[in-house]
Image: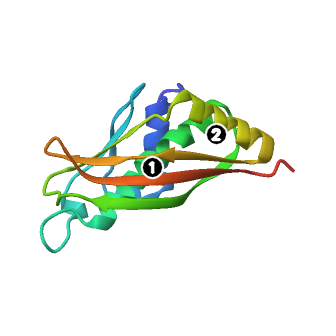
C-alpha cells in the first residue's frame, strides 16, 4: 500500500461503497468525476425487479447518491464539517431501464455554490438544489429534483 493520499475520486468511491453499504450492494462505481459533474453506474443484475428491469428504488437511490456526492465534495474541498442530508425530492420515471444503470448529475452553478457555502458558514445551514438523471439508451429514463441540506456540526 502506498503512502499517498487517495484522489478525490478514490475518496468518494470509498464513501459511497464503504460508509454507505447500499452503494456496495448496488455495485456502484464512479464512471466520471470532472468539471461537468459526476456519473455513477451500477449493473442491472443486483438492481433488478420482477419484470427484469431496474427496480425503481435502485434508480432513486443511485440518483440521490449522485446528487449527494457533489455537495459532499464541496464541503470536503472547503474543509467544512457538516452533515449532509436530502431534505426533499421529487422523482419522475419516464421509461423502464433494462440495461446497466447510469446516472449523471451536473455541478450547480457557481452562484448557487457560493450561496450554499455562505449560508452554511453564517447560519450553520446550507441548501443546494440538484437534478440527477438516469440515462438509458441515450435518453432520460428518470429524473430527480432534489434539495440537499448541509447542517454544520457543533464545534465544541
The secondary structure type at the circle numbered 1 is helix
Residue pictured at 31% horizontal, 60% vertical = 92
Place of residue 39 in the rendered image (x, y in percent of width and height, measured from the top left): 33, 39
Q: Mark 2 or mark 1: which comes first in sequence? A: 1
Place of residue 112 in the rendered image (x, y in percent of width and height, measured from the top left): 58, 35
In the drawing, what numbered circle is on residue 16?
1
Q: Is residue 82 left or right of residue 57?
A: right
Residue nearer the viewer, 128 or 46: 128
* Residue linked to disc 2: 116
The secondary structure type at the circle numbered 2 is helix
Residue pictured at 43% horizontal, 51% vertical = 65
Residue 88, can we see it? yes
**Figure check: 146 above or below 137:** below
Q: Is residue 22 left or right of residue 137?
A: right
Residue pictured at 49% horizontal, 31% vertical = 8
**Figure check: 112 above or below 25:** above
Frontmost of labels 2 and 1 is: 2
Place of residue 128 in the rendered image (x, y in percent of width and height, measured from the top left): 56, 45
Residue pictured at 13% horizontal, 45% vertical = 137
Residue nearer the viewer, 16 or 147: 147
Q: CA distance from mark 2 to mark 1?
A: 22 Å
Q: Quadrant of residue 45?
A: bottom left
Crowding around mark 2 (Cα neighbors within 10 Å: few <14, some 14 to 19, many 20+) is many
- Name the outermost residue toward the right: 156
Q: How is the image coloured?
A: rainbow
Place of residue 118 in the rendered image (x, y in percent of width and height, measured from the top left): 72, 36
**Figure check: 26 above or below 2:** below
In the drawing, what numbered circle is on residue 95?
none
Residue 25, can we see it? no
Amino acid at each position: 500500500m502506498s503512502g499517498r493520499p487517495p484522489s478525490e475520486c478514490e475518496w468518494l468511491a470509498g464513501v459511497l461503497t464503504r460508509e454507505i453499504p447500499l452503494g456496495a450492494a448496488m455495485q456502484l462505481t464512479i464512471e466520471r468525476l470532472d468539471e461537468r459533474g459526476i456519473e455513477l453506474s451500477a449493473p442491472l443484475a443486483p438492481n433488478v425487479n420482477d419484470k427484469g428491469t431496474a427496480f425503481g428504488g435502485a434508480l432513486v437511490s443511485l440518483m440521490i447518491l449522485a446528487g449527494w456526492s457533489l455537495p459532499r465534495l464541496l464541503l470536503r474541498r472547503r474543509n467544512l464539517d457538516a452533515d449532509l442530508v436530502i431534505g426533499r425530492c421529487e422523482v419522475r420515471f419516464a421509461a423502464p431501464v433494462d440495461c446497466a444503470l447510469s446516472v449523471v448529475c451536473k455541478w450547480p452553478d457557481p452562484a448557487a455554490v457560493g450561496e450554499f457555502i455562505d449560508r452554511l458558514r453564517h447560519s450553520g445551514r446550507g441548501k443546494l438544489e440538484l437534478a440527477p438523471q438516469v440515462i438509458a439508451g441515450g435518453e432520460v429514463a428518470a429524473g430527480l429534483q432534489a434539495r440537499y441540506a448541509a447542517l454544520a456540526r457543533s464545534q465544541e
